[in-house]
């Protein structure tokens, strides 16, 4: 069986190499080209399983957008004591300058990637919200292309929900958020450039959307309007799908040392002359400490129970939680609240004594920077490995697009931890990916 | 037709992508013809002339004692530290293509990526006399494959005009360099040397894929003057300097009119002027004034054309000035004086 599968997939490894499909690692500066491992055994989701995930994500994204609109306007939720105010107001990703700014359709998080895991009880739970610049969607579409080519007769008649229209859905949403009165908006995708880890994805999306892929140096702001430098001079820009974090977007407003951004972009944004997706300041909504309050946030704004529950979370800024965390360090996963990509995580059951002590010291020194969660035994999926087909841990990142309303791409990115026993699926830490099949029929 | 406007940065990248591919192909041609020449006597001198052709002597002798075939070949084929090597040209082409991924076709990218991986895998065994010709032919064909894929798949909007401009300007430049390799042969040598020289001019024509085309024009005697004249002035041969200049001028004119661009009038004038020079001179006049000097003039002229393209279309000018399309903000090199 493994031999047979390999004979199918070998040409596609070669194809990937030829395509130069890459995932750059900051830590490996010498090797900027790396193939994201692709596992040929798909992960299958039944129609009813998907229905629950889809509803859960729409509910969650809706609540996060309501939260952001409230945080940047009346701050009712803080006044009502649902979230500790300093968790928001003292958050490094809170942007006071967004206060009172108008955001089209109150859609702050236009593109959201929600990390979902499945525990031993079979229930899907949200592990993390990614409401800033989530990546990975290009692999969803590329993986499907690869499956269709490698196993055409297998996919044929399986009744899979398609994933190909992500680009046109995204363009449609970008049009919906264009500044008022803009009839044929010029949309661009703003990338940090070819050395960015996700540059391949930026290229992919720009092509799928049919919009120019620009870097900061291609854009210029004059009289609070954004233009791009073309061979014929300056050309106005109306909507920017930016894949650069807030901090680096505008050296005038944020980090003055940023070379990636566009001086004056925030002036144009606050003047309502350009739309940004995602909006500025969404980082307060996907903060790992705020995460713990999302079920309460959903109840507060929507008067509903969370369709997808959270993983139990201890917020170490709270004395009881800190004490519990310190007492049970060897059983818990400790995560810094501000980091993404699996960096800085300590997995208690797998950590050495020295690692646990280092983690303890960091917790005591800066408790507000950490949360802890019980070590969930991630579900596994059959995966092609050197020794045959083996169980490997997986998670799922569906992608939701929000303009006037929210649409969820059927399936999403299934990441797989290729090392035996490993729970870390991040592509930056040796993870791979699988095609995710959502079945049309029961 | 609504199409996205072309970023200045992309225009520059596509221009240079085309140039680097063309450069790699022509360098392979030059090495190939030299390999033919250098069999037997005078080998050392012929490899030295390649270095002189590219003004690379100084950098070469920093690393190497003497210009043996093996060292010069490695310097031009696989030395990643040498910016004028074929490996560097292909690497640069690929880096530009990576930036251009949103614009170039997937086939263009894949072929270039495969080509690059192949270039990096070249080992010493591929560069020995028995294998060298096959290697150089392979490189030439990889470049031609790229050009063909571009012809068949590259979307014909503004970007494709910058591709044409880069391709023809580089090709014109490379033809002058190819011709310059044999320039010393035009300056003296008795009857005894003549027969060998004629053989070398044959090889030169063949390396430019021009032997049969030459025969269609000159069925009688093959003389150095006729070969030089053919490579400079022939209006139908795809690698002649004249044809390349005409194609570049046409591409620029089409680009400007189709996309209503106001910049670049000085470049159009410059290319027209160059075309007139090439139409009105005879090879005897050129040889009388010195072929090498004329080739130098052409190379200098093409450099100025490139400078002016950068100013008109790729300019990193302050935004407030870039809308005044015609007024360039820094002094541009004047076009070289035509040698009399």
Image: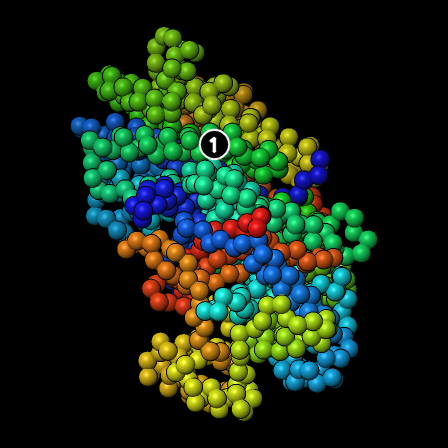
Q: Foreground: B208 or B273?
A: B208
Give the side of residue A382 with respect to residue A56, left or right: left
Vertical side of A82 occupied by B261: above or below = above
Q: Position of residue B309 (x, y in %)?
A: 58, 41
Look at the image and tell me in which quarter the N terminus of chain B lies.
Answer: top right
Callout 1 secondary element: helix
Q: Which residue appears farthest toward the left when viewing the image?
A: B40
Q: Is residue B259 left or right of residue B206?
A: right
Residue in view at x 46 percent, y 78 percent:
A374
Nearest the viewer among B122 and B322 is B122
Residue ID at (37%, 60%):
A391
From the viewer's side, name the closer residue of B320 and B153: B153
Chain of the residue where label 1 is placed in the rendered structure: B
**What is the crowding at mark 1: few (fewer than 14 residues within 10 Å), some, or many (at least 20)?**
some
Residue that label 1 marks: B149
**Above or below, A361 relative to B316:** below
Q: Quadrant of residue B2?
A: top right
Residue B8 in percent (x, y) is at 60, 47
Place of residue A89 in the rendered image (x, y in percent of width and height, measured from the top left): 66, 81
Q: Is residue A8 visible?
A: yes
From where the camera sits, is residue A218 visible? Answer: no
Q: How is the image coloured?
A: rainbow
């Amino acid at each position: 069986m493994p031999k047979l599968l390999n004979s199918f997939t070998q040409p596609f490894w070669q194809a990937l190499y030829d395509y130069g499909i890459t995932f750059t690692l900051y830590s490996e500066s010498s090797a900027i080209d790396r193939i994201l491992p692709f596992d040929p055994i798909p992960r299958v989701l039944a129609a009813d399983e998907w229905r629950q995930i889809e509803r859960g994500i729409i509910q969650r994204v809706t609540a996060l957008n309501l939260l952001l609109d409230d945080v940047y306007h009346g701050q009712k939720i803080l006044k009502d004591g649902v979230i500790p105010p300093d968790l928001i107001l003292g958050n490094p990703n809170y942007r006071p300058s967004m206060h009172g700014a108008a955001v089209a359709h109150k859609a702050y998080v236009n593109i959201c990637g929600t990390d979902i895991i499945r525990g031993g009880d079979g229930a899907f739970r949200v592990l993390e919200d990614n409401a800033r610049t989530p990546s990975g969607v290009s692999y969803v579409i590329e993986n499907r292309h690869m499956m269709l080519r490698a196993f055409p007769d297998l996919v044929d008649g399986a009744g899979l929900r398609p994933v190909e229209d992500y680009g046109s859905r995204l363009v449609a949403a970008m049009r919906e958020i264009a500044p008022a009165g803009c009839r044929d908006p010029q949309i661009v995708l703003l990338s940090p450039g070819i050395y960015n880890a996700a540059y391949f994805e930026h290229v992919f999306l720009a092509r799928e959307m049919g919009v120019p892929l620009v870097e900061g140096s291609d854009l210029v702001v004059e009289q609070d309007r954004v233009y791009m430098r073309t061979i014929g001079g300056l050309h106005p820009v109306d909507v920017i799908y930016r894949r650069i974090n807030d901090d680096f977007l505008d050296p005038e407003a944020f980090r003055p040392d940023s070379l990636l951004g566009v001086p004056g972009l925030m002036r144009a944004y606050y003047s309502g002359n350009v739309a940004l997706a995602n909006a500025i300041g969404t980082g307060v909504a996907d903060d790992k400490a705020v995460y713990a309050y999302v079920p309460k946030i959903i109840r507060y704004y929507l008067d509903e129970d969370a369709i997808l529950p959270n993983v139990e979370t201890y917020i170490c800024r709270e004395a009881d939680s800190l004490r519990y965390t310190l007492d049970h360090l060897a059983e818990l996963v400790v995560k810094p609240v501000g980091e993404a990509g699996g960096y800085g995580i300590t997995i208690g059951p797998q950590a050495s004594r020295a690692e646990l002590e280092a983690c303890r010291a960091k917790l005591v020194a800066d408790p507000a920077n950490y949360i802890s969660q019980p070590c969930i035994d991630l579900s596994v999926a059959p995966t092609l490995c050197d020794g045959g087909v083996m169980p490997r841990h997986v998670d799922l990142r569906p992608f939701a697009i929000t303009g006037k309303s929210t649409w969820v791409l059927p399936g999403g990115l299934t990441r797989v931890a290729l090392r035996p026993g490993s729970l870390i699926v991040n592509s930056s830490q040796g993870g791979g990916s699988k095609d995710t099949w959502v079945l049309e029929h029961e | 037709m609504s199409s996205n406007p072309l970023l200045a940065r992309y225009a520059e990248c596509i221009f240079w992508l085309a140039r680097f591919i063309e450069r790699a192909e022509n360098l392979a041609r030059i090495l190939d013809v030299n390999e033919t020449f250098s069999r037997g006597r005078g080998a050392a001198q012929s490899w030295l002339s390649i270095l002189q052709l590219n003004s690379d002597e100084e950098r070469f002798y920093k690393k190497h004692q003497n210009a043996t075939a093996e060292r010069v070949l490695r310097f031009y084929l696989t030395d990643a530290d040498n910016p004028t090597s074929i490996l560097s040209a292909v690497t640069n082409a690929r880096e530009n293509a990576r930036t251009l991924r949103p614009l170039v076709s997937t086939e263009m990218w894949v072929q270039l990526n495969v080509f690059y991986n192949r270039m990096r895998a070249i080992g010493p065994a591929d560069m020995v006399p028995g294998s060298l010709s096959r290697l150089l032919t392979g490189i030439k064909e990889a470049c031609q494959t790229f050009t063909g894929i571009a012809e068949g798949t590259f979307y014909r909007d503004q970007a494709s005009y910058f591709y044409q401009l880069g391709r023809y300007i580089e090709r014109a430049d490379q033809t002058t360099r190819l011709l310059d390799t044999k320039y010393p042969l035009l300056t003296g040598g008795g009857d005894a040397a003549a027969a060998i020289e004629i053989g070398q001019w044959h090889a030169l024509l063949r390396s430019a894929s021009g032997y049969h085309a030459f025969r269609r024009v000159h069925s009688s005697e093959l003389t150095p003057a006729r070969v030089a004249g053919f490579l400079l002035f022939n209006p139908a041969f795809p690698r002649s300097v004249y044809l390349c200049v005409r194609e570049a001028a046409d591409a620029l004119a089409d680009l400007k009119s189709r996309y209503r661009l106001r910049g670049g009038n000085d470049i159009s004038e410059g290319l027209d002027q160059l075309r007139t020079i090439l139409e009105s001179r005879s090879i005897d006049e050129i040889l009388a004034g010195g072929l090498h000097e004329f080739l130098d003039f052409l190379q200098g002229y093409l450099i100025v054309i490139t400078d002016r393209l950068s100013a008109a279309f790729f300019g990193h000018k302050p935004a407030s000035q870039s809308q005044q399309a015609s007024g360039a903000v820094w002094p541009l090199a004047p076009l070289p004086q035509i040698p009399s």
